[in-house]
Image (cartoon, rainbow, N blue to C red):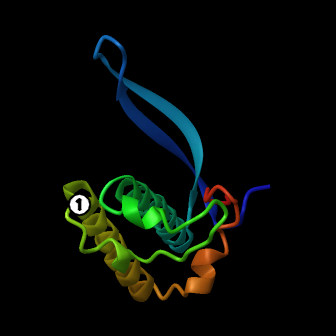
């Protein structure tokens, strides 16, 4: 049974095959109404932000923050924040931190303009692998 907020539509995927010939793939899909699609998009941004932040920490602790990891033992838990890596000199970390800030700004703007509370946004984030719950 489909949710009441869906409509049938066709999705076209454009890609290139191994010989660089353009191909289209057509698939039947079900379109959600506007607001649920905005919520889903925000959830995607939120999950992406968390993945990028994890990558930033892994890059930083393998490089510029390597010495910090000596203070930790296996199983230790620490709540790293963006402020812990904002002033690092690594150009890759800097670019990813900038991207995270852009994602944060977009999330805030879209939540505000669409009147979407954090509770509604987080309701669909239930999988332990940070995948979206459809």
Q: Quadrant of residue 36?
A: bottom right
Of 43 and 95, which appears nearest the observer?
Answer: 95
Place residue 106 in its image quadrant. Answer: bottom left
Q: Give how far across and how far down residue 57 sits, in percent.
A: 42, 61
Give the answer, above or below, for where 3 lies relative to 25: below
Front residue of 121 and 28: 121
Vertically, is 67 above or below 110? above
**Rendered-image quadrant of the N terminus:** bottom right
Q: Tag count in the figure?
A: 1
Residue 87 to residue 15: above or below = below
Residue displayed at 72% across by 63% down = 3
**Residue at point 61%, 59% (across, down):** 130
Q: Which residue is mark 1?
A: 95
Q: Residue at x 48, y 88 (%)?
A: 115
The image position of residue 41, as x and y in percent, is 48, 65
Q: Position of residue 100 (x, y in %)?
A: 34, 68
Across and down, in percent, residue 69 comes to 47, 63
In percent of the image, x 35 and y 63: which residue is there?
65
Left or right of 41 on screen, residue 110: left
Q: Left or right of 124: which side holds 59?
A: left
């Amino acid at each position: 049974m489909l949710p009441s907020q869906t409509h049938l539509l066709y999705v076209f995927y454009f890609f290139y095959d191994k010989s660089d010939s353009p191909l289209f793939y057509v698939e039947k899909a079900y379109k959600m109404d506007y607001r649920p699609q905005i919520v889903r998009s925000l959830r995607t941004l939120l999950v992406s932000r968390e993945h990028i932040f994890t990558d930033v920490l892994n890059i930083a602790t393998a490089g510029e923050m390597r010495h910090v990891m000596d203070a930790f033992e296996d199983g230790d838990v620490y709540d790293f924040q963006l402020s812990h890596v904002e002033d690092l000199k690594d150009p890759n970390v800097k670019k990813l931190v900038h991207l995270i800030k852009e994602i944060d700004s977009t999330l805030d703007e879209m939540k505000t303009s669409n009147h979407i509370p954090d509770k509604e946004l987080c309701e669909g984030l239930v999988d332990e692998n940070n995948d979206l719950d459809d």
